[in-house]
Image (tube, rainbow, N blue to C red):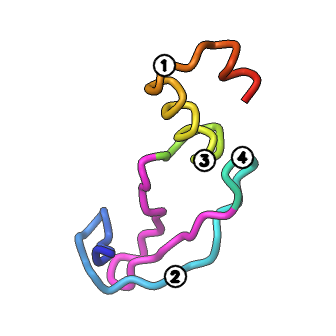
Amino acid sequence: MKELTCPHCKEKNIKKDGLRTTEKRGKIQRYRCKLCNYRFVVDDGFYRMRNNENIITMSIDMYISNLSSRKMRNQ
């Protein structure tokens, strides 16, 4: 796992600062920079997505493997 840095000041001295609760994605870890006091969430590639990341990756996988729309709906 790569080391976390503050996106605002690029400082490596950060701490956990509670959880952010979303309706679709559940709880997401929030961090705070000890230098500039900036709060942030690590971007995992699914930032601002409205569905669970498991559903999104499963849908992309079915699309790439050429499943028909009907089979995807039934899945």
Magenta stretch, residue numbers: 27-45
- What residue type is disc 1 on? Asn
Q: Quote the CA–CA distance across marks 1 and 2.
A: 42 Å
- What residue type is disc 4 on? Lys
**Vertical arrangement, residue 52 with respect to residue 6, above or below:** above
Q: Is 42 within the magenta?
A: yes
- On the image, numbered disc 3 is attached to which residue? 54
User: Between tags 3 and 1, which lies in front?
Assistant: 1
Helix, strand or loop at label 3? It is: helix
For marks 4 and 1 on the same chain, the one whose residue lies earlier in the sequence: 4
Say left or right for 53 vs 38: right
Helix, strand or loop at label 1? It is: loop
Quick check: marks 4 and 3 in contact, CB under 8 Å? no
Crowdedness near tag 4: few (<14), some (14–19) or many (≥20) residues, C-alpha within 10 Å: few
- On the image, numbered disc 1 is attached to which residue? 66
- On the image, numbered disc 2 is attached to which residue? 16
- What residue type is disc 2 on? Lys
For marks 3 and 2 on the same chain, the one whose residue lies earlier in the sequence: 2
Quick check: marks 2 and 4 in contact, CB under 8 Å? no
Residue 44 occupies quadrant: bottom left
Helix, strand or loop at label 2? It is: strand
